[in-house]
Image (cartoon, rainbow, N blue to C red):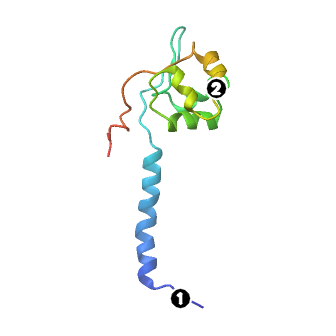
């Protein structure tokens, strides 16, 4: 039987928690505070939370994550570059979404 040196165990005890923190930190995205949408307001593709994007008709958890991963969008029509989203879905969502210019705080390196 092969025995692992004690130094490897010590190193693993130090590195694994740090790796976990890096994964958690990567998933912590600072969005603008979400508010309840009123008539005429739209969910922003560049700033909307996962829950807000999932609330759109035809957008489930998988597509919502894909939208977040594909940010930033320069226009609503740019949404078609997300696999699984076609012109017809974009057309049906146009009255509910927008693509504001600017960058998210996490894209600019805030909070590092």
Q: Secondary structure at mark 2?
A: loop
As drawn, 76 above or below 95? below
As drawn, 100 above or below 72? above
From the viewer's perspective, is 92 left or right of 49? right
- Residue position for label 1: 3
Task: Choose top left, top right, bottom left or bottom right for residue 83.
Answer: top right
For the residues marked 1 and 2, what is the alpha-carbon distance in whole angstroms? 55 Å
Quadrant that contains the N terminus: bottom right
Q: Secondary structure at mark 1?
A: loop
Where does residue 108 sit, x and y in percent of width and height? 33, 37
Task: Choose top left, top right, bottom left or bottom right for residue 105.
Answer: top left
Q: Residue furthest top?
A: 39
Question: In the image shown, does 70 or 11 lie closer to the viewer?
Answer: 70
Task: Choose top left, top right, bottom left or bottom right for residue 12.
Answer: bottom left
- Residue position for label 2: 86
Neighbor class of circle 2 (other Cα within 10 Å; few <14, some 14-19, many 20+) is few
Where does residue 75 sit, x and y in percent of width and height? 47, 21
Where does residue 27 sit, x and y in percent of width and height? 48, 45
Of tags 1 and 2, the one toward the viewer is 2
Neighbor class of circle 1 (other Cα within 10 Å; few <14, some 14-19, many 20+) is few
Question: In the image shown, does 46 or 39 lie closer to the viewer?
Answer: 46
At horizontal 32% and vertical 41% (from top left) the residue drawn is 109
From the viewer's perspective, is 59 left or right of 4? right
């Amino acid at each position: 039987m092969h025995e692992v040196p004690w130094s490897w165990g010590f190193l693993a005890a130090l590195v694994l928690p740090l790796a976990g923190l890096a994964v958690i930190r990567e998933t912590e995205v600072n969005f603008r505070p979400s508010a309840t949408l009123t008539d005429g307001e739209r969910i922003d593709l560049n700033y909307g939370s996962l829950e807000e994007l999932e609330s759109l008709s035809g957008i489930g958890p998988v597509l919502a994550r894909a939208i977040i991963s594909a940010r930033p969008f320069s226009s609503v029509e740019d949404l078609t570059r997300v696999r699984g989203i076609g012109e017809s879905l974009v057309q049906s969502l146009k009255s509910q979404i927008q693509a504001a210019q600017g960058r998210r705080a996490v894209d600019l390196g805030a909070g590092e």
